Image (cartoon, grey):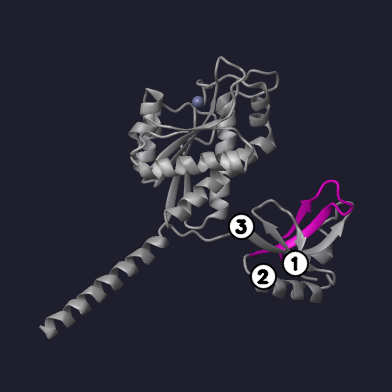
């Protein structure tokens, strides 16, 4: 009957509207990430091999902290919880329990590897089961980032079957999770890399980019904060005293950035905008306030590459 057909279409439309509404509501929910720096306290993990190098527990904490900072600074609607933020010993049971009770959506454990064969190097990401599609996807993207963007040798993804044993942290946590082995401390070159600030930045940002790409693929929308606009008000070859009246009267935070090796290595910037037009307005205001050479710069992916956006 005609009437019933119409009612069918009406109901179908209603369901469609409701389901679209639901999807939109999901995009604004907070994503909680539980970051677990392996070992700690009396459990050092793998011990440092070379003079002046750190034990695994320290490397894990440093890399994990960098990763957590990237996530909380650059992705909106995300919350980071750590299993530890100090050199404390925490049992595997307790890590699992805390992660499960926290209601976290994802679990990322950070470790560094060892092998009797010093020649072995590279990264590996563990998951509990290849049947866990989200864990597997996240692990694959992280390994891909390691090899393509961070210049690491990826040793691939393994699940419990491939390994022949379980990893408690992955087996008992309820949410999609990965355990990342960031490199081999038994390989002298890789140990140095893992101990260096730059090396840790590469590792942490590769995991971060992998996680961000994973969220995009999972269709969980996160705001793009990769490009930040600031107004550069001054550059100098020597440090400038920010207590001077001309800065104080601005009533806005002036930040000093250092670009070693450049003639004007000290650069002074204000604002933190994600919209170029707003940054340009700020630039106009600062020019009126006496900084006639102020211009807008963009900082991409936190890498503080300044490039002149407007004159
Ligand atoms: Zn470990």
Circle 2 residues within 10 Å: few <14, some 14–19, many ≥20: some
Do the residues under discs 3 and 2 have CB atoms within 8 angstroms? no
In magenta stretch: residue 207? no
Do the residues under discs 2 and 1 have CB atoms within 8 angstroms? yes
User: Whole-percent x and y of residue 295?
Assistant: 78, 68
Residue at position x 51%, y 20% from top? 42
- Residue 55 drawn above or below residue 116: below
Residue at position x 69%, y 70% from top? 279
Q: Is residue 66 visible?
A: no
Residue 220 is labelled as: none
57 with respect to 277 (left or right): left
Give the CA distance from mark 3 to mark 1.
16 Å
Precedes in sequence: disc 2 or disc 1 = 2
User: Whole-percent x and y of residue 45?
Assistant: 52, 22
Image: magenta residue range: 250-273
Name which quarter of the figure residue 44 lies in: top right
Say which residue label 1 marks.
Answer: 309
User: Whole-percent x and y of residue 223?
Assistant: 52, 61
Residue 226 is labelled as: 3
Please, what secondary structure does the residue beneath circle 2 have? helix
Viewer-proximal residue among 253 and 94: 94
Please, what secondary structure does the residue beneath circle 3 have? loop
Circle 1 residues within 10 Å: few <14, some 14–19, many ≥20: some
Circle 3 residues within 10 Å: few <14, some 14–19, many ≥20: some
Q: Quadrant of the C terminus?
A: bottom right
Q: Is residue 311 visible?
A: yes
Name which quarter of the figure residue 129 lies in: top left
């Amino acid at each position: 009957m005609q009437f019933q057909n119409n009612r069918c279409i009406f109901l179908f439309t209603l369901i469609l509207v409701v389901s679209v509404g639901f999807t939109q509501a999901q995009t604004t929910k907070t994503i909680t990430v539980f970051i677990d720096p392996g070992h700690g306290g009396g459990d050092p993990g793998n011990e440092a091999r070379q003079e002046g190098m750190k034990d695994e527990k320290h490397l894990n904490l440093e890399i994990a902290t960098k990763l957590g900072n990237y996530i909380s600074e650059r992705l909106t609607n995300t919350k980071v919880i750590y299993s530890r933020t100090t050199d404390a010993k925490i049992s595997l049971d307790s890590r699992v329990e805390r992660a499960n009770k926290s209601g976290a959506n994802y679990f990322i454990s950070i470790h560094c590897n060892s092998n009797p064969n010093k020649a072995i190097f590279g990264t590996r990401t563990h998951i509990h089961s290849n049947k866990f599609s989200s864990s597997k996807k996240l692990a694959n993207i992280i390994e891909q980032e390691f090899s393509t963007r961070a210049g690491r040798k990826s040793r691939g993804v393994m699940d419990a079957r491939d390994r022949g044993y379980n990893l408690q942290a992955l087996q008992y946590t309820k949410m999609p999770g990965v355990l990342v082995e960031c490199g081999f401390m038994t390989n002298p070159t890789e140990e140095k890399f893992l101990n260096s600030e730059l090396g840790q930045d590469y590792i942490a940002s590769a995991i971060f980019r992998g996680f961000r790409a994973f969220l995009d693929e999972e269709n969980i929308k996160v705001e793009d904060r990769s490009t930040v606009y600031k107004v550069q008000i001054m550059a100098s070859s020597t440090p400038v005293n920010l207590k001077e009246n001309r800065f104080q009267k601005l009533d806005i935070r002036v930040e000093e950035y250092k670009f070693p090796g450049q003639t004007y290595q000290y650069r002074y910037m204000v604002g933190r905008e994600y919209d170029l037009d707003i940054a340009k307005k700020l630039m106009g205001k600062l020019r009126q306030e006496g900084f006639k050479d102020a211009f807008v710069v963009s900082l991409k992916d936190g890498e503080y590459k300044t490039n002149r956006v407007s004159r």
